[in-house]
Amino acid sequence: MRILTLLLPASLMVFAGCGGGSMSMTPPPAKTIAGISVNGSPVKVFDHTKDKQQQYNIPDAQITAWRESDGTVDLMVPGFENYRMRGSNLENLTIDPHEIYSSETSGYQIPEADYDYAHWLMGPYSLDGKTFYSLTHSEWYACLLDNACNDATANGLGADLNSWVATPNQMISTNGGKDWQLNGVHSAHTVAPLGYTWTGSVAEQDQVYLQALNHTGVFQPSRVIGENGYYYAVGFYIHRDFSQLNPTAGVYEAPVDGYGYILMRTNDITSPGSWQIWEGGTSFAAIRTGTVQTFQPMVNGAVANAAPPQIIYDKIAECYILIFTIYGGSNPVYYMTTKTLAAPNWSAATEIIGTASIVTDPGGPVTGFNDSNYVSILDDISTGYNFEFTDGLPQLFFSTFPAQYGGDNLGRDVYRLPLTISYQ
């Protein structure tokens, strides 16, 4: 899975958090985050040469983890063929050969309204360690309607990527994460249907996906994290104005008019239809009727073309930390913070010291990070079932992406990298 990106002007929502170099108009807490830095070397967690169970058992999104009621730790290896690793903690894990969800076997439904084609499990959440709910990154392609996904395209990206609709859904497991299914039949499992609807449209009739990129929707939602009775997740949003298409005049690409991170929440983790969208300030509304407000990080005083993020709560500084990297190239990992998700005020982004010089794939070798690494953050000390918390010594998890240097795109590994959060 790769999100094809655009760097566009967008509304900016960047405010003071609980660290990272921003000024705050409110009295500082007893502790603030002074910085985050690398504190060790990468350690391989998932080795494709011995752990991979089938062709598409690859890390293809942000890594998340959960803890079962008996204390067993599970690490998601997210792909459209989903597996997990298991063990006593994040540093002692082995692959489970049992596939926990197969898109090919259980999905691959062509009707668009079902939103049931390919699914990546993005972050299980539980209240009891037995029944888990997970948001998905789910993909559907308009070319399926015309059996045209293998047809040649003018831009060389493929008809599937050109007509890609990403729609987060919800899955459920009643046995600690061993097996998963959609939480509701047909579209009842859908959480955020914010992508373009192709079926019966002029865009579909004209097969504009054979000419240009027209991907839309909500991509790669973060883990779910709780605050005061609500459960939040951050997604990556792309919206296009399809009224601007004009195939007669050679205009096959709908211009992007919404781009960036979005914040979603629910007060009922069991109900896919209960999720709300952040509209700005303290305002949230039902996703299907609300106004989507995007936000983007500021890096070195400029809007960053930031890849999908991951989130964790720092118990010492009492704030949320959002980590991300930049699309393309070789970059550091950055973080920004906010005291609350109910009325988010994000700090300016700050570099995680040392990440720019880390060798992230010795096969290249590749130094530094980009969107292909799907960066995530986890801490073994986190209490409960959902790995929501850190107390200052988290680990950065990331995947390799050998295709960026001509290697085998299915030969991906997962590493963990120890971090230290410093306080003042």
Image: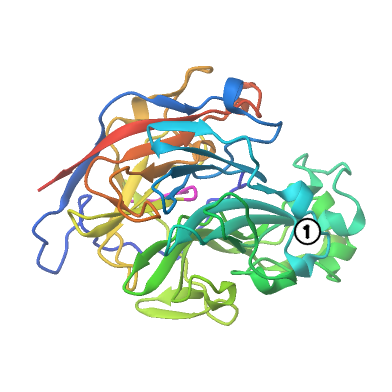
- In the image, residue 192 above or below residue 72: below
Indicate the quadrant where residue 205 lies. Answer: bottom right
Determine the main secondary structure of the stretch shown in magenta. loop
Q: Considering the image in quadrants, where does the N terminus appear?
A: top right
From the viewer's perspective, is 267 left or right of 160?
A: left
Q: At 50% from the left edge and 56% from the top edge, which residue is drawn? A: 124
Q: Does the image show residue 329?
A: no
x, y (%) of residue 166? 65, 58
Residue 87 on image: x %, y %: 44, 36
Expressed as whole percent of the image width and height from the top left, the position of residue 123 reads 50, 54
**Residue ID at (20%, 53%):** 19
Q: Is residue 105 above or below residue 156?
A: below
Q: Residue furthest front?
A: 70
Q: Is residue 136 magenta?
A: no
Image-based side of 145 in relation to 382, left or right: right
| Residue of label 1 | 251
The foreground one among 329 and 383 is: 383
Return the x and y of residue 415 as percentages of the image width and height.
44, 30
The way the protein has been coloured in the rendering is rainbow
Residue 249 quadrant:
bottom right
Q: Amino acid at mark 1?
A: Val
| Nearest to the observer: residue 7 or residue 371 | 371
Q: Is residue 147 left or right of residue 191?
A: right
The residue stretch that appears in magenta: 301-308
300 versus 113 height, above or below? above
